[in-house]
Structure formats: structure tokens, C-alpha cells
Image (tube, rainbow, N blue to C red):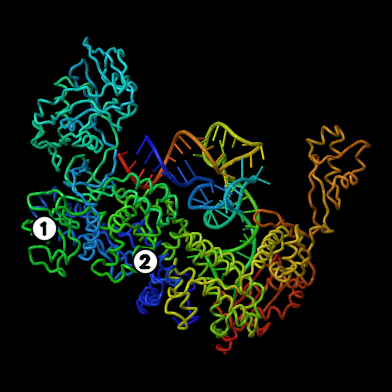
Amino acid sequence: MSRFGEVDDQYDPHALEQRVFEYWDDVDAYKQTVEHRSDGESFFFVDGPPYTSGSAHMGTTWNKSLKDVYLRFFRMQGYDVTDRPGYDMHGLPIETRVEEQLGFENKKDIEEYGEENFIEACKEYADEQLEGLQSDFQDFGVWMDWEDPYRTVSPEYMEAAWWGFSKAAERGLVEKGHRSISQCPRCETAIANNEVEYEDVEDPSIYVKFDLQDREGSIVIWTTTPWTIPANTFVAVDEEGDYVGVRAEKDGEEELLYVADAKHEDVLKAGRYDDYEVVEERSGEEMLGWAYDHPLAEQVPDRVDAEGTHEVYAADYVDTHGDGTGLVHSAPGHGEEDFERGRELGFPIFCPVGGDGVYTEEAGKYEGEFVKDADPEITSDLEAAGALLTSETVTHSYGHCWRCDTGIIQIVTDQWFITITDVKDELLDNIEDSDWHPDWARDNRFRDFVEEAPDWNVSRQRYWGIPLPVWTPEDRDDDEDMIVVGDRDELAERVDQNVDPEDVDLHKDTVDDLTITEDGTTYTRVPDVFDVWLDSSVASWGTLNYPSDDSRFDDLWPADFILEAHDQTRGWFWSQLGMGTAALGESPYKEVLMHGHALMPDGRAMSKSKDILIDPHEAIDRHGRDVMRAFLLSNNPQGEDMRFSWDGMQTMENHLRTLWNVFRFPLPYMRLDEFDPRETTVDAVADDLELVDEWVLARLQSTKQTMTDHFEDRRQDKAIDALIEFVVEDVSRFYVQAVRERMWEEEDSASKEAAYATIYRVLRETVALLAPYAPFISEEIYGTLTGSQEYDTVHMCDWPAVDEAFVDEQLEADVAFLRAIEEAGANARQQAGRKLRWPVPRVVVAADDQRVVEAVERHTDLLAERLNAREIELVSPEDRWGELNYSAEADMSELGPAFGDRAGRVMNALNEARIDDPSLEALAAAVDDELEADDELEEAMVSFVTETPEGVAGTAFGLNGDDRGVAYVDASLTDDIESEGYAREVIRRVQEMRKDLDLDVEERIALDLEIEDDRVASLVDDREALIREEVRADELGAVEDGHRKEWDVDGVAMEIAIESLAAAEASE
RNA sequence: GGGCCAAUAGCUCAAUUAGGUUGAGCGCCACUCUGAUAAGGUGGAGGCUCUCGGUUCAAAUCCGAGUUGGCCCA
């Protein structure tokens, strides 16, 4: 870009962004920036890999924008930043998508299609999805290493998972075990608890009577899963709970039922008993050991029947006041808690259900039926056996597979685990080694989650994932003597077949058939693949291609910084901690920034499936990338959700437009004067800097300090707020207004040079501060300001440091007062009906305190200029402005009782009184005529009102809500003031006419002026020189044709004509 | 059902370690100004600070209970 070149009149985000994209390509901006920092201190950022399904939504967009702003910030601070993006490409979500595309219904279809083909199809699908995300992220202007993302499906990455798992195995943390797990019967695989989604469904709700042996009566249990009754093994009670025996009567028959005391009314009501009576009170403890008959003994002949089963036991999962009866049907072959308790009690684990949710042979009569379909039959069998107390339905939340929405079932299967419960203390210790923003997320939420986390089931009975690197002795499937392979070299070395470690893909189809033979034993591979959460859990070394590339691991690991949304406490924050601790004994990250979710403008969650969303592409279409990014980044990134807002987007566009306008304002002048920013620096012109220059430079220093502090607190939102306030309030609305005339000066002057140097410095640093947020507009402004004199891209700049020479807190405070006075003055002017264009003879500032006096004394000239006042008079706090009078406003409700029928006259006197001291004494003296000897005026009767002299209006000014004084504007007219006022009116109109003709700023004109009112005409004549200079009129009164217009200036008719001299000459 | 977080103007948020008359920006309405400005300026409307209790001379702020929303867990 050429320095001070022509720029768009209007901020046009789309055209600008396209130009910048092309420019970045031309100069290889990203690569240069990375290279520029290659000698810096290392900073290891790890990208949490988005799952490759669908395109970028607003949440991902916010996430990547946040990453981008921090990575750019760290780079500007000099760090050599690791910025490899990642993609999470394995797992059930993609499998189910591909199954849908291929029209598959279950695993058999996959087997028929062929594992290899299916895996290939998944790979293709994942690759396609990755491309969509890649191009979106690049389109948002995110600078990461897009040429080399880490992909969880690459052999190097899969090897990183193998390595981590094998390290955990070396520490004895890998075991195969029987566990109760959540199973998706359609996907035929275990799914993690955190992949279970809960939805309300209607289910059976049955109360079942288990007849007691050796004593009269039945115990009553409640369940919403009749299909688990065949596996019933024991009944649990609360040892400390209160239970009752109830003798109940229905249809003339009587029975004795045992339930929790707190639940007996509900239960008997549900059973529609005619009448009942509590006949026994028992503690849970007393019921321990009671034996009962399995109600489906006939239907399920192979049911569990070991010593001590079908008896009552204590368990801590019983609640005598919750749902149900206070007696809990327990089937260790299904429920997780039942399983744990059953194991403690030493019972066999009976689970007559297969991975597809179909009863096995062990289920006797029900063999071959899908469990949920068997509910009605089981219920009617219970009824036939006289065991059904009642059958209803209930709507409750029930777990579903997060991908295919099938209701999950709890069954006990063999799975592989990383037994992180064995290192729980270490996990909790390692939490302490990471800093979180916000800190409560770590200390409350994350700690709670880790404390309660069970062992990690890492095996899935699926295809599209990283194969477990576990080989077990042929014909045995336990974890004794297992072999865990840690990398590809080890694989090639140990397997019986020929494998090229450089070449092997590592997916299931390439390793399934490999065997290992050692010491005469042949080992075969466990057919499972890893839980997809294990993939991303190794990202901290997978990003570095460790272990296949060990060049950087020692230097970089663990990660310095990660940044994800709050749903990752259960996800990636956790899985990484678990894996890092299991494999290496350390937290794999040092600092966490946890942001929230993107919500709809009305506060609802966005949802793609329900089509409730704001598409980032639409946001870009409407406002551009910089605006979207800056809007997203102006939201609190710490734990709180972000509401998207179109208004907020528009406001951000307005702010960026203001910056654009500030930037383009001085360009023509700088160009004309051949201003050289390298020679004419603020330091070079230090002696010529005027007050406003020093002030805006001081504000720049404090803005940099504020922004840096906020960035270091990870509150980039507050940082950009500070920057916008500086640009809009200080630079645009104050500084630029104040220096316009200096820039218009035609002659070279030290003052103009100082203004150029100042605004140049301000703009040059502002775009560096803005660059991480709005990289496109910053680039174009930077390029236009610097041409080829600096870096090729603003993103190579250092983060601007505070320049102590320009820090001036006193000046900042002074100007804050001046601006408050100016604001009050503008208000007073409006009250007095005098526009700013007309000078006023004086402004009187009545200061309430010494600080205001100091500010005004130090900067009287500036204040006079801003207020367009000929003179500033200062009244110090201990004095009162002598020209003020006071009147009183009487309160009749007080006067009435005090003065009776004289009240009206007193009131008039009070209201008419004019006194020069607002005291009751002075007032009493002024209305003396109406008062009688013992009358006493009281504070409550009146309130004092300040009366300004004729033609003067006053307005109070203050700072942060505290009144600090009053500004009085004396708007009286003199010939001299009218002369300048009318001259300014003429100038403004001529300027407007110049604009009509689209004249260049430098263009000379001829001016013709006719004013009917002789007095005004003569007043204007007095200012001829001023008018000629301001409107660049070389000739007066000689316009024949030209541009001619009639004006009405406050009732005075004028006719103005102008003509460009260049045009006039050309036509001659 | 449990945990965490949030709730202040129509919208987005402030209210300065630890109580002292609720503020800003945007939007809206009126007026005004304009040779950088789809700008700017002035004024205005707009709030039982989610509800109910408690502590206190005093609560948006501290405590308790609830409501709504978001996330997490079951």
C-alpha cells in the first residue's frame, strides 16, 4: 500500500476485507508474522479440536475468534506461539451420519458392507466436513496454521493416543472389567455417561409385590423398567429408614404389605385399596435378611439363584421419601449402583440381555425379544402371578443416545477402563496446577466433577475410532498378561506379520488381523476402538506429533493456554486432565480460559436441529468480518453466555466507521504537505506540541495501560471497550474537533506539524491495539499510514508500550473538567439561543472547588476556544458571582397555616423578591412590608432560585455525578459579535455551496454576496478578510453565472454566488 | 432431583477489593448543527435493581427461601 494513498470515502467492510485477503496472500503476511517471532520465547497454545460435523456456528465462531485475539496478542508481546489447529474426526456421530447416508440400520449392515469400506466412507465424510470448517475459520480472519492442522485420524495422532494409553497401562491404570454401562442398543456399543442425553418420555410405572418366605405378607417395589425384573437379585432398604406393615383390603381380600412409612399412603392409593390399616412399624434394619420369592421364577428358570440372593439388604441408594416405595428392586446385571452393591455382596452378576438390547437364552421365556418391547408381557405375567399391585405410566426424563436418539439401556458388559479413581488424589492435586478464568469454574464446578468421576470406560464396540492397542492371549479375554503396544515401531517389531511402521494406517481394518506370538503364546487384538473423548484427550502431545516427533515435547509440554466453552468441564478440560495425569502424572495445561455459549438475541440457546440460530455467514454478509469479530470479542469471555445482538453489531460497525473517518480526515492534508512521519515524530516536535496534543497522547498512554491490564486479566472485552471509548470520545469527538483548523492552515507551521505528528502517532498505535480484534481494517489503515516504511503487516507490530514521556494524569484530569464545563456551556448556549458559531462575550465559570479552579486557570485559552467565548471569567469557590440574583419560590402549603389570610400577599412578595444573597435574612428584609412583627420565615416555606442577569444562562457541570460548579454563558450581542456571527453564517453557506460543486479543498473561487439588510451587510463587510481566507475566495463580487443560491439567515435574506476560478479560466 | 452461574432502562452492560440518593452506551422521541463523519450537540421519555423474607440507622450489594434462563450432573 502506498503511504497516504487515496482511501474509500465510506467504510466499506466487504471491499476492504477482500482487498486485505488478497494483500495477505501477496505478502505472505501470516508466514512473515510467524517467522518474525521465531526467536521469541515459546508459548504453547493447544487448540481444542472441533468435531467435524456441520459448518461453523456462532459458538465455534466466538471460540475461534477468542483464540485468534489472544494468539495475536501473545504474538505482539513477542512470543513464538504454537498455533496448530485441530479437528476431532472419529466417533459415533460420524458413523451414524454415514450409516444414514448409506441407508444402514444396524451393525449387521456395516459388517456386510465391509469394515474397511465403512471406515473409508467415514474418513471421506470427515475430510469433507473438515474442509468446510477450515474455509470458514480462514474466512473469519483467524490466523492459525491452516496448512498443517492436526487430525485425530492421522497415524501420527493415533499413535499419540496409543502412547498415552500405554503409559497409563505401565502405571497399572488399565484394566478390563465387568461394569454396568450405558448401552445404545442400536449402535450396539457402550456410550459414555456424558454422551447420554435426557429427554422426557412416557414409561410404564409398576408396583410389584414380592411374596415373603417364612412370614406373612409381601414387600412392594416400584420400577419404570419392568424388563429388568427377570434379573432381580435382591431388594434394598434404607437401614435407618422407617417402614410399616399395612393390612390392606380390596374386593374383600386382605393382604399384608410392607413399604416405607412415608410412602404407604401413596402406594395404597395407587393400588386402589378399599381400606387399610397400619399394623406394624419396622426399621429398615429389622427387615434385613427377609427372603422373598422371585415373581417370575417360572418364566425365567435360569435366573440367579445363589446363596443369599432374593433377600433384603441395606444400600445407601435407597430413599424412603423419594419416588417409589422405599424398597428398591436391585438387579446388579443392569443398574450401576445395583452392580456395585451386588459385587460387594458377592453375588453373581446376572444380565440376560445382549448388546443389541435383546434377551438372551438366560431370559427363558423372553429370549429373543427386545427388552422395551417385553415390558407389557412381563407386566401381564406379573399380574397373572398375582404380583402386580398396580400398573400405570409416568412421564420422566430418560437417557437417550446423543447421536441416534435411541433409549439407552443399562447392562453389564466387559469393557476396558482407565482406572482414574486410583489416582483421584493426584487428579485433584493437579487441578491446583492450572489457573482458570474464571476461578470459580475450577474451584467449584470442575473440582466437584473430578471428585465424583468414575473410572473411564474407554472401549467402544464400533469401527470409526482409534483401535485399542491391546493384545490378549488367544482364547482368553482378561487383562492378565495383556500386551499394550505404545507406538508404530513397537507394533512392527512385535507382530507376527510384516508391517511397515511408516506406512501403517492404524485404523481397525489394518490392525485387526495382526497377532503377536511371544513365549509360545499367541495374542490377538481386542476388537474395540477408543471412546472418541480419548482422541482429543491426548491433544497436548498429539499437537506436537509426539512420540513420533520428539523434538519439541520437552521444551513445550504442558500447554501454556487453552480456551474453550463451559461445556468442556465435563469434556475436554476433564479428558485432558485425566489422560495427562494417567499417562504422565501432570496436568497437561497451565491456564484455562472458559467462555460461555452463544445465545439467541432473546436469550434462548441456539439449536441447529430446531433451526434456532444466527448464522455467522449472515452476520458477515450484513456487517463484515471485523464487525462480527469485534462484536463477539466485546463480550465477557469468562464463563458467561453471550447474547447475539444485531443492534450490537450495528453499533460496532458505527464505531469502526468512526475510526475510519478519523483516519481518513488528516490524509489529504498530510499528502499535500508531504508529511514524513519518520522525520516529524512526536519526539521531534515535542517543543511545539500544544495542550490538546499532549492531552490526547496522555490519553493514549493510559488507554494502552488499561488495555494491557485487561488483556492480562483475560478480559479482552474490557480492553476493546477502553479502546473504543478512546477513539470515539477522545479522538473523534474532542481531539479532531480541536485540531481541524490547525490542519487547514495553508502555510507550514510548527503547530500543524505537531498536530500531524500527534494524530499520526495516535492512529498508528490505535490500529496496533485494534489489530487482534479487527485485523482487516487495522491492516488497511496501517498500510496507508506506513506505506513501505515499516512491516508488511500490522500483525508483526509489537504490542504498544506505554511511553512514560507522555503520561500526564493531571492533564487528563484537567481536560475531564474542561469537557464537563464545555458540555454545560453548550447546554447554556442552547438555553440562551446562541449557536456555537456565534461568539459570546464571556463565559463565567463558578467553581465549587479548587481543583476546578486549577484546571480552568491552566487551560483558559482552550476553554475559550471550545466555547467560542471572547473571555472566561473564573469565580473561585469562596466567592459568589456578583451579578447573580436570587428569588424565592413560596410553598403555599407551608405559608397557609403560618400566615392565614395574609398568605397570598406574602407569597406574591416572596416570589417577586430579588436578593443578592440566598439567605432567609435577606429574604425577610426584601418582603419586610408584608411581614408583621412576630412573623418568622422558615426554610420549609421557600426554595431559593438563582436568577441570572439578562441574556445569561447557566448550567451546572460535574464529574461522575458530583456537581463541581456552574457555567454561565453571557450571550449578549455587540456589533463586533454580530459581525463575526454573520460572517460565520456566510462562511458556512459558502462552504456548503463549495461542497455542492464538489470542489477540491484547495480550489480558489470567486464570490459574490448580496445582503438586503444594510446593517447586516456592513457588519459582514467588516469581516471580509476572514471570509475570503476561510472560503479561499480570491475575487469578490465578480461572479456572473456560477453557482447561485438564496439564503435566509435568521430572517435576513442573502444571495450568494460562487464560481471556481480554475473553471472560469478554463471556459475563457 | 442435585451443583454452578446469571437476573439492574426496550437492548448490552456498569455501579471502583469490603453496604451510603442507580449510571453509561445503543435504540426511541423532539430540537439543533455540519468542509472528516450514514457523524456531532442539547433535551426528553424510559427502573417496585426477578419475587418474598431476614440482618442493618441504611441493601442492587450481605444472609435465607423461591422464580426464570444457561451450563453441568443424575
Q: Position of residue A1059 (x, y in %)?
A: 60, 81
Determine which quarter of the picture holds residue A517: bottom left
Q: Residue furthest top?
A: A252
Residue A177, position in %: x, y?
A: 19, 45
Q: Look at the image and tell me in which quarter the N terminus of chain A lies.
A: bottom left
Residue farthest to the front?
A519
Would you say A29 lies left or right of A227 here? right
**Spatial distance from mark 2 to mark 1, Cα to Cα?**
36 Å
Q: Secondary structure at mark 1?
A: loop
| Residue A1047 seen in the current view | yes
Given the image, on which type of amino acid does mark 1 rest? Asp
Q: Which residue is mark 1?
A: A512
Q: Dot 2: what SS?
A: strand
**A148 with respect to B59 (left or right):** left
Pick the front one: A680 or A466? A466
Count residues near mark 1 (Cα–Cα under 10 Å), then give few for <14, some for 14-19, many for 20+.
some
In screen coordinates, is A840 left or right of B23? right
Q: Toward the viewer: A394 or A986?
A: A394
Q: Which residue is mark 2?
A: A44
